[in-house]
């Protein structure tokens, strides 16, 4: 249990990739703060499950990642109740797909706030605690869209390219403080975010479920397989190890070969 005694905040961890990362950290003994939206009973069940996995305390904080004040309050609550934070994972994210002329400005604002600005606020709040401890791990869930673009995803692609640049900058700023800052860039991962796109795409394009999965979603992914959330979590866990302390400012692709093409 190499994370025993460490405290981690994973934003957007009530489902998908964030929840898998929270579980992986708890299984190594970390006190985890989970965050995100969803059914209160289901979230409480996940929180209790994390405590059983880690043998340490777990918190749920409902901070809305589009609200800077809520972000600062969550980091301070974690510091007071669990210590640290020693590890933060900037993972919360949303998507909206539309051509530029049809893209609602409020969706642009929400995606930039949740997918990009929240990571900046999280780092701004957490870095002083990490510097004081002379140890820290900052991870961002970026995307293949931090490296390449797709049409009709202007806000998402801009936010994810921004996350890649932000990661490099804060890595340089903290390089001599025992802190590493890295991002992981998955291709299509099998999560509710992806699964929920299938019925609409079936309807709008007149395709079967199989066709949407293989010809639309996995069209750019040479392996023709979805990445699994647990695979992303395994890499996140590795980047928290002492053996990974020389890795900082990196952007790790986990995209079945998408960005190699
Ligand atoms: P998901 O929809 O399963 O999870 C998103 C999480 O973010 C949920 O816990 C949700 O409640 C939370 N969230 C949304 N808005 C929030 C807000 N305003 N404040 C706090 N929490 C909020 O999605 P996922 O696929 O697990 O995505 C997680 C991250 O991975 C995102 O940043 C996404 O862009 C990125 N990603 C996903 C894929 C994929 O194919 N699924 C690929 C590359 C990158």
Image (tube, rainbow, N blue to C red):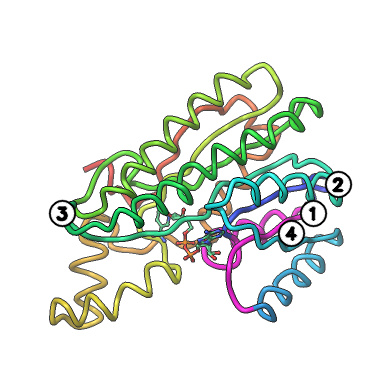
Mark closer to the observer (3, 4): 3
Residue for badge 2: 80
Which corner quadrant of the image does residue 21 belong to? Answer: bottom right
Q: Which mark is residue 27?
A: 4
Q: What is the CA distance from the residue labelled 2 to the residue labelled 1? A: 13 Å
- Contact flag, marks 3 and 1 (Cβ < 8 Å): no
Classed neighbour count for the residue bearing mark 2: other residues with Cα under 10 Å, few (<14), some (14–19), many (≥20): few
Q: What is the CA distance from the residue labelled 3 to the residue labelled 4? A: 46 Å
Mark closer to the observer (2, 3): 3
Q: What is the CA distance from the residue labelled 4 to the residue labelled 2? A: 23 Å
Mark closer to the observer (4, 2): 2
Which corner quadrant of the image does residue 185 belong to? Answer: top left
Mark 2 CB lies closer than 8 A to ligand 1:
no
Q: What is the CA distance from the residue labelled 1 to the residue labelled 4? A: 10 Å
In the image, the segment drawn in magenta is 13-39
In percent of width and height, residue 46 lies at 70, 72
Q: Is residue 160 magenta?
A: no
- Contact flag, marks 4 and 2 (Cβ < 8 Å): no
Q: In terms of sequence position, does the residue under pointer 3 or pointer 1 come before the other? A: 1
Q: Which mark is residue 31?
A: 1
């Amino acid at each position: 249990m190499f994370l025993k005694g460490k405290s981690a905040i994973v934003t957007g961890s009530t489902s998908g990739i964030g929840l898998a990362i929270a579980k992986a950290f708890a299984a190594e003994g970390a006190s985890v703060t989970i965050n995100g939206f969803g059914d209160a009973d289901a979230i409480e069940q996940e929180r209790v499950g994390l405590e059983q996995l880690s043998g340490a305390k777990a918190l749920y904080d409902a901070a809305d990642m589009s609200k800077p004040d809520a972000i600062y309050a969550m980091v301070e609550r974690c510091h007071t109740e669990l210590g640290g934070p020693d590890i933060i994972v900037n993972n919360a994210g949303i998507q909206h797909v539309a051509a530029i002329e049809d893209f609602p400005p409020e969706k642009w604002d929400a995606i930039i706030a949740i997918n990009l600005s929240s990571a900046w606020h999280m780092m701004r709040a957490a870095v002083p605690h990490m510097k004081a401890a002379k140890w820290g791990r900052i991870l961002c869930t970026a995307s293949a869209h931090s490296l390449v673009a797709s049409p009709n995803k202007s806000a998402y692609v801009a936010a994810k390219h921004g996350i890649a640049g932000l990661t490099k900058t804060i890595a340089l700023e903290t390089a001599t403080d025992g802190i590493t800052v890295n991002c992981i860039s998955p291709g299509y991962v099998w999560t509710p975010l992806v699964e929920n796109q299938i019925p609409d795409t079936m309807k709008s394009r007149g395709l079967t479920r199989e066709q949407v999965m293989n010809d639309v979603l996995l069209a750019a992914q040479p392996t023709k397989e979805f990445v699994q959330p647990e695979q992303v979590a395994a890499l996140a866990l590795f980047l928290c190890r002492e053996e990974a302390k020389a890795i900082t400012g990196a952007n790790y692709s986990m995209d079945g070969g998408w960005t190699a093409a």
